[in-house]
Amino acid sequence: MNTTKGPDFSTFSKREVVSLIFSAMSYLKNQDVIRTGNALAGDYAEYLVAAALNGQLAANSQKAWDVLLANGEKIQVKSRRVSDPVIPGQLQLGVFRSFDFDFAVIVVLPDDDAHVVRAAKVPRHVIESSTSYQKRVNGNVLSASAKVMSHPDAIDLTALLQAAQA
């Protein structure tokens, strides 16, 4: 039995801890131990959006949205970890099965670090009109494309989320 104590994470920032995990997950993916590391990315993105926008995280059982803002806006958070350069398909977001939210915040993170590369707050109408229904997943799919992230009605939140990481 290994009784070696790990590092004292209390000396690290939250971003540094997540970056260490992302680096370890990237290594494990390259070694064919795991296939993806997106679950942590999603939780971390939700945390950042709530912190940056002074929102409240929804209960885990909430299906349609992830963060509630003080003004009543419901935010759906979608994130992706991508390589540099981006490999085709890496920008496909999780499935939208409901549009019971006001905005989606899309967060792009690198696959080996937790630094926010890009983040945008996109109105529901842009999300709805940009998705396509796919029967095999029983929902609507969307890519975090430049067309969506840079839509005239979208708000660039990159700097705000990066500040929340500090």
Image: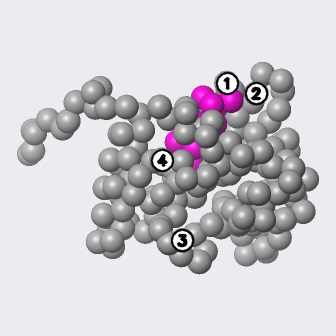
Q: Do the residues bearing badges 4 and 2 touch, measured as CB atoms within 8 Å?
A: no
> Of callouts 3 and 1, which one flags the residue occurring earlier in the amino acid sequence?
1
Q: Which residue is nearer to you in this view: 79 or 83?
A: 83
User: Which of the two labelled residues, at mark 3 and mark 2, occupies the earlier sequence position?
Assistant: 2
Identify the residue under disc 1.
Answer: 54
At x 91%, y 53%, the residue is: 125
On screen, residue 22 versus residue 136, left or right, reads: left
- Name the spot of residue 155 as percent of width and height, x first: 77, 45
In this rendering, position of residue 166 left or right of residue 47: left
Q: Is residue 119 visible?
A: yes
Count neighbours of disc 1 (C-alpha within 10 A) and say few if under 14, some if 14 to 19, many if 20 or more: few
The CA distance from mark 4 to mark 2 is 23 Å
Q: Is residue 145 above or below residue 74?
A: below
158 lies above or below 47: below
Q: Amino acid at mark 2?
A: Leu
Range drawn in magenta: 42-53
Secondary structure at numbered mark 2 = loop
Please, what is the three-letter code of the amino acid marked with disc 1? Asn
Disc nearer the start of the sequence (1/2): 1
Q: Which residue, given by chain and number where applicable, does mark 4 sit on?
A: 115
- Marks 1/2 in contact by CB < 8 Å: the verdict is yes
Residue of label 3: 86
Amino acid at circle 4: His
Residue drawn at point x = 47 percent, y = 67 percent: 83
